[in-house]
Image (cartoon, rainbow, N blue to C red):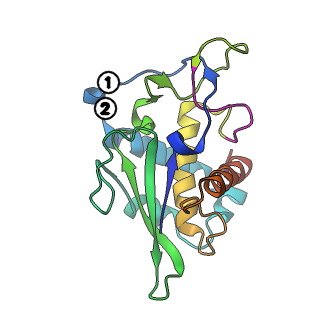
């Protein structure tokens, strides 16, 4: 079962001011960026936040089940999918039931590494109503108000949460886009409440 953190299909657009550096694809050190984010995630894994991941060993997951690629596990290219930050494939048994664990592939071409989506910054301060350039998160989004680094950490936690969700109670990789959006937002709101 695959689920993903995809801004192009799960989050409506709003207006924001750029507060993050913009990276050209050729100057991006993907591993350095992801490793830095993972170090921040590790610091958040205490108390109620750590309890969200009771079915897996989060430190083992972060060390051994995350990669950066230009395609998903089936070989489908991430080209043109800058809004798709990552895809997590959950482990399943012969009866097609989810098991604790999985693997997450981060899209090396995504906003996660560049800080932009369709040429616009993904985070920042809102402009007054009707002004500014399109951004990503409206005030109603659980992701609203996060810094870019916090957003990156939330994405890593989100993907790890999906590997932990053995009941599929928060599955955001279903054929129903409305259900996916609700579950995606539920995951992010829970993580923001418990980890930030």
Residue 169 % position (x, y): 67, 68
Q: Quadrant of residue 174?
A: bottom right
Horizontal side, residue 83 vs residue 78: left or right:
right
Give the Cα distance between marks 2 and 1.
Answer: 7 Å
Q: Residues within 10 Å of mark 1 (few under 14, many from 20)?
A: few
- Span colored in magenta: 134-142
User: Which residue is at a point 28% across and 47% down the rendered structure image?
Assistant: 70
User: Which residue is at a point 30% across and 35% down the rendered structure image?
Assistant: 29
Q: Nearer the viewer, residue 102 or 57?
A: 102
- Magenta segment, principal secondary structure? loop
Q: Nearer the viewer, residue 169 or 13?
A: 13
Residue 5 belongs to magenta span? no
User: Which residue is at a point 40% across and 38% down the rendered structure image?
Assistant: 82
Q: Are marks 2 and 1 in contact (CB under 8 Å)?
A: yes
Depth check, mark 2 against mark 1: the one in front is 1
Q: Is residue 120 above or below residue 3?
A: above
Residue 171 % position (x, y): 60, 64
Residue corresponding to mark 1: 24
Q: Is residue 136 above or below residue 99?
A: above
Q: Is residue 6 above or below residue 131?
A: below
Secondary structure category for the residue under label 2: loop
Q: Nearer the viewer, residue 102 or 131?
A: 131
Residue corresponding to mark 2: 28
Residue 58 % position (x, y): 53, 63
User: Which residue is at a point 61% across and 65% down the rendered structure image?
Assistant: 53
Horizontal side, residue 110 vs residue 140: left or right:
left
Residue 176 % position (x, y): 60, 59
Q: Residues within 10 Å of mark 2 (few under 14, many from 20)?
A: some
* Quadrant of the frame with the C terminus: top right
Secondary structure category for the residue under label 1: loop
Q: Is residue 97 above or below residue 193?
A: below
């Amino acid at each position: 079962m695959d689920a993903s953190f995809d801004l192009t299909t799960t989050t409506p657009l709003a207006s924001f001011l750029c507060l993050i550096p913009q990276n050209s694809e050729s100057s991006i050190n993907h591993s350095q960026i992801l490793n830095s984010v993972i170090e921040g995630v590790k610091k958040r894994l205490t108390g109620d936040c750590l309890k969200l991941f009771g079915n897996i060993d989060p430190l083992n997951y972060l060390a051994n089940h995350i990669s950066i690629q230009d395609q998903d596990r089936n070989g489908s290219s991430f080209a043109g999918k800058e809004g798709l930050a990552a895809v997590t494939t959950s482990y399943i048994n012969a009866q097609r039931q989810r098991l604790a664990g999985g693997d997450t592939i981060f899209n090396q071409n995504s906003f996660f590494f560049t800080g932009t989506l369709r040429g616009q910054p993904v985070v920042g301060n809102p402009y007054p109503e009707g002004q500014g350039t399109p951004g990503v998160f409206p005030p109603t989004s659980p992701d609203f108000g996060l810094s870019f680094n916090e957003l990156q950490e939330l994405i890593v936690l989100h993907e790890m949460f999906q590997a932990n969700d053995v009941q599929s109670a928060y599955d955001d990789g279903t054929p129903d886009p409305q259900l996916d959006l609700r579950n995606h937002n539920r995951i992010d709101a829970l993580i923001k409440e418990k980890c930030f």
